[in-house]
Image (cartoon, coloured by chain):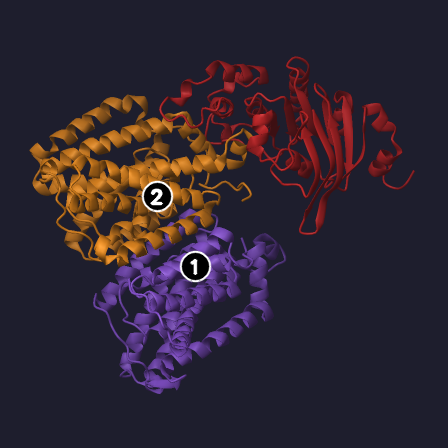
Amino acid sequence: MIFGVFGKKSLPLLVLFLVALIFLPYAAPRFYIYLASVILVTGLLATSLNLVLGYGGLYQFHHAVFYGIGAYTTGLMLTKTSLPAWVAFASAPVAAAFFGLLIGLICARLSSLHFGMLQISLGSLIWAIVYRWYDFTGGDDGIHGIPVPEAMSTTTSSYYFILAITTLCLLLMFIIIKSPFGRILQALRDNPERCEAIGVNITRHRIIAMVIAALFAGAAGSLFVTLEGSVFPELLSWTLSLEILIMCLLGGWFTFFGPMLGACLIISLRTFAGNYTEYWTLILGLMMMLTIFFLPKGVFGFVNELFRSKAPDLPLEESSHVAD
Amino acid sequence: MELHTGLSFSVLCIQILVGLSKATILFIVASGLTLILGVLRIPNLAHGSLYMIGAFTTYSIATVFSQSSLGFWMALLLAPLLVALIGLIMEQGLFRFLYKRDHLMMLLFTFSFTLVFGDLVKLVWGSDYRSLAVPEIFQGSLSLLGMPFPRYNLFLLLLGPVFAAGLWFLTNRTLLGKVSRAAAVDREMVGAVGINVNRIYAAVFVLGCYLAGIGGALVAPTQNISQGMDHSIIIEIFLIVIIGGLGNVWGALLGAVIFGLTDAIGILVAPQFGIIFPYLAVITVLIFRPKGLLKSIW
Amino acid sequence: MLQIRSLRKSFDGFQAVTEANLSVNPGEVVAVIGPNGAGKTTLFNLVSGQIRPDSGSVRFKGEDVYGLSPHQLCRKGMSRSFQIVKIFSRMSVFENVQTAVISRMKKTSNLFIPAHNIAVKETEAILEAMGLIDKRDSICGLLSHGDQKVLEMAISLGSDPQLLILDEPTAGMSGEETARTIDLMKHLSRQMGLTILFCEHDVELVFSFADRIMVMQQGSTITQGTPDQVRNDPQVKKAYLGGHD
């Protein structure tokens, strides 16, 4: 179900698409290049969430925390230290993964809603600290005018950087999903009790999954810095967390590219509908309602089902949960 | 980071009372959420939006009466009814068909209401914030322990136990309450006994929304009524409900008290980072009692 | 191989298991029978770690395994199938069994090699033995109930256990499917030397097939012994036939 409708034959299609993206700056005005960058970064973030949500079945309700941590790490290092730029960028996923480990150690014993709520509390705590620590993080203003390295300071150059890193990260995530770990992750989603019975340490694997997801979210965060040149507390807000959750839902969380598609849809909607009306959130809300009502598997998933033999229509959570 | 040492006892006491009076509003709104969560199993993210609509509506109604005391009482009466009506429409029109879906879907569905309501509020009332004057009867402060204590806060403080008692009575002594509690545990059994479960669900949902509306009405004179109200309150009341125990009204009370107190004391002790204290309290509770302090329905 | 003494478990005051004793020797096929509500499934859950006992002792292969979690017990060589089928419904039959094998091989943290190539032969061997090989690519959520129960067993075999615990392996099966399952169990016991512990409602079946039988009633063990011993035990007669004699 990775490629969805298209199956293995879609590989040339993907390559074609990638080539198109590479040539985008030659064909499109600056605004569209910027938009594409935004979609790539957000799509990467949403895909990292889907690693634990769609493939792992975890109610990761505050994923944006790792994104924000990554962004702030890069932003702070570029602004406050004179370490080389690549260090600043490489530290973002590391810092985010570290927090992923911390939060994972605290939350991973729990299941579903309790897991989600504890994560929201921990995430809100971190947000509150960032929001108030004016001296260090710039408080509610955030940090502006971050010295992004020359090589990625224009719209086009940052686009290529973002495209390269995003492609690399997506490739890595894809490999991980196809690996034995990825298989166990999906098994954990489908039937945690059965997993335990075949010898899998559930908590440990959940923590690993969270660390990996946090790592890629942190990478997305560092990319954000090249996009905007600033960081602010909204990057850690739970509303952003819910937004990316929606992107996964809308695009289809049982497929690999679903979240990216969802990101594309929502960002495009926000940008273009925003031209016509102030009330694009209203439209988004209505779209969401319609999708949930009629297309429980998201847009991508729906298209999938039209063309392939189906996997059984099962809810995200199984009724059997391991006793906590 | 400034730490206030040498806190006088009276300052602390007053601050505690202020915290408790704020906790009243949190309790009222949270109890609505916990009832909906406990009986209908819906994690209603739109609860914050309903609260916000309650506040804005209160502002409008009170303004019609030139923000007089009469205006406030009229608003307190009517605004929650409007919110309850909205809730009825939501439940009958949409939620009713989705009870079989899994919780994540319901969560996101209620979130879409947050988006819709957010923009509707903007449409009706614009993007600026509003303020409502404290009604005349409650203006000014009393002197407690030699410090000023706003009358309105006293009003809220006294209202808390009234609501707690009222809700206890409703859930334990009335037929609706008892049947709802049964339906929360086993929907099918209640249906099999011949009771119209759909009506119960609708009633509980509407009650929950009504409580959100009251909370919004009560908070209106105490702070700026703004667009972001829904976002800030929803996290707070969700955490309160979780630490109290899902579906447990007393739990909502306990949670609200914890939240209000830690917030108030936090601001006193460490003004810059005071906001962290409630979150720390919540995390501590959840680490040791992940299912909440009191018995939860789930 | 398995020794259970005086195992107890209560839930909120309800004594589900009061005094359970059981011994299983290597290579044996042991059955647990008893009326509904006797505590058979609870006992199995206690043995395989899904539930923690209140008191008693459990020894596996001479080692004290009281209170260990299911995944730890699996690593020690105990594997189980469930009464209500617990399978990975979105995956294919092949992938289900393969996942168990991957876990056994301790490759679960491996991030960078593709999963579908691992242990193909071993997985196929298990599927062959269980008669599921021609359904290997079917999504198992769509299989018939009988096939799913066989798959349950196949998954537990993926862990290469020494003790196989089967909770009502023929529940809900047609006569034909039941016979097939019994044949499979005989094959596992006699050709592959597995020790099997199972529980069943169908008493006839049990008497024809098991080496030894343990009878439970209201949470405690009434008796253990060979089919003949159990058949003639007065307490068992009383439990199954009620008070009139």
* Chain designation of label 2: A
Chain B shade in the render: purple
Left or right position of A19 against A68 = left
Chain A shade in the render: orange
- The image quarter in which residue A295 lies: top left
Give how far across and how far down residue B282 sits, in percent: 43, 57
In this view, the residue farthest toward the front is: B6
Depth check: B69 or C52 in front? C52
| Residue A264 appears in the rendering | no
Q: CA distance from mark 1 to mark 2?
A: 20 Å
Vertically, is B175 above or below A278?
A: below
Crowd tier of the residue under label 2, counting other residues whose Cα lies within 10 Å: few below 14, some 14–19, many 20 or above? many
Which chain is drawn using red?
A: C
Left or right position of B99 against C228 = left
- Residue occupying the point 47% across, 58% down: B243
Vertically, is A76 above or below C173?
A: below
Label 1: which residue? B281
Label 2: which residue? A99
Give how far across and how far down residue B223 sits, in percent: 30, 72
Give how far across and how far down residue C148 sits, in percent: 56, 28
Q: What kind of residue is marked 1?
A: Ala
Q: What kind of residue is marked 2?
A: Phe
- Residue occupying the point 60% across, 22% down: C161
- The image quarter in which residue B209 lies: bottom left
> Do dots 1 and 2 share one subunit?
no
CB atoms of marks 1 and 2 within 8 Å? no
Crowd tier of the residue under label 1, counting other residues whose Cα lies within 10 Å: few below 14, some 14–19, many 20 or above? some
* Chain designation of label 1: B
Left or right position of C27 against A100 = right
